[in-house]
Amino acid sequence: MNFSNKAKEHIDSCRFCWMCHHVCPIGNATGLERNTARARALGLSLVARDAVEYSDDIINNVYECSLCGGCMTDCVTGWDPVMFTKEARLGAALDGKLPPYIMTMVNNLMEKGNIYGVENENKIPDFPETDTLFFIGEDTRAKGCAKEAAEVLKKANVDFTILKDEPNSGYSMDFLIGAAAETKAVMENCAKVLNNYKKVICYDPQDAKVMMREYKEWGIELKCEVVTFTKFVSDLIKDGRLNVKKTDLVFTPQDSPILARDLEETEPVRDILSAIGTVKEMLLNRQYTMLAGNLIMNEYMPNVITKVAENRWINAKNADAKILVTTSFAEYTKLNETKPEGIELMKLEEAILKCL
């Protein structure tokens, strides 16, 4: 496998460093050294030097990373394990060495439009055509619904539409194989649809991330304005279009790593929660948040992702949280599966509807 010079530099710098050892949600869940950025860099450094083959074990280890960016946030010297991990995944794809469980998801996406290989079971009603699109996203369409989020928009008299046949944003392909031609094709197909609208409201932070960041990196033009659901609703409240009431409820936000680190968006959720109640923070918040769930990885290492969610609940309990509020469907799903007694869990839109 051929690594770029930049990736080799970062691999060499990370392979003897322990700085981010304690912040990896996967490493904390498994207790295994192999799941730290340092151990991953050690293995990939041997591959980069042609000292060992790009073996199944090393490739599997590359897919044990959630790409959450906690290691990058904690690194004061600016090295980037996420970058070389994604490059290693691309190398596996180009060399025809993708693990069977990854190939299954890639094939599912190409055939069914989502990595889970399920038909869209959401009964999307007919929406009138407007210039504002509410983009629900792959995970929610395959595994849940965004009924409450749409209800929030309706309460503010937002004129929006939802597509019955929504294109895949390309997030999951970017996660699984990175900068491959197949990934770009999925993104370009999505961009063609998005460019029929003036504004796109992304329900899921992961779709917002690829549209707002990756499309630019790939030279894919978006003529529409893309905004996260969280930011859009925060502005609705500030502009007086969504009338909420202040309550005595105490909310603890679970910051999505994608929102907090990739998009550097941390305040809109707090502005919303402050408007409807009081905010009580966990110790690890904003850009220092801990991942609480990943549905892609849940397909091939569910026990580990369950432990990741359980660990986040421990953080919430230590902060004496009363109501934990999420902005990520994936994190909500895993947190809901592992919820302990004594703490409520709400999607952001559920909290808002409770306080109208």
Image: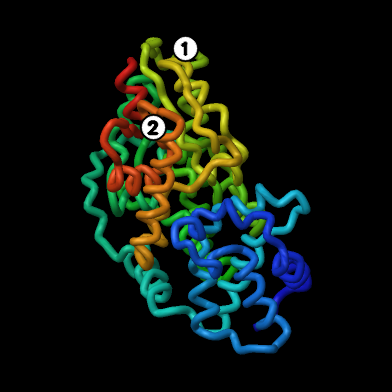
Quarter of the image containing the C terminus? top left
Q: Is residue 49 left or right of residue 320?
A: right
Residue 56: where, in percent of width, then height?
49, 83
Inter-mark Cα distance, 1 to 2: 25 Å
Residue 187: where, in percent of width, then height?
52, 58
Residue name at image x 75 percent, y 71 percent = 12
Residue name at image x 40 percent, y 28 percent = 321
Colour convention of the picture: rainbow
Q: Is residue 146 left or right of residue 36?
A: left
Residue name at image x 37 percent, y 11 percent = 247
334 or 91: nearer the viewer: 334
Look at discs 1 and 2 and give the one toward the viewer: 2
Task: Check disc 1 and give the amino acid type.
Answer: Gly
Return the residue at label 1: 240
166 or 144: nearer the viewer: 144
179 or 284: nearer the viewer: 284
Quarter of the image containing the N terminus? bottom right
Q: For residue 118, which quarter of the picture?
A: bottom left
Return the residue at label 2: 324
Q: Is residue 113 visible?
A: no
Residue 234: where, in percent of width, then height?
49, 23
Mark 1 Cα shell of 10 Å, populated few (<14), some (14-19), many (≥20): few
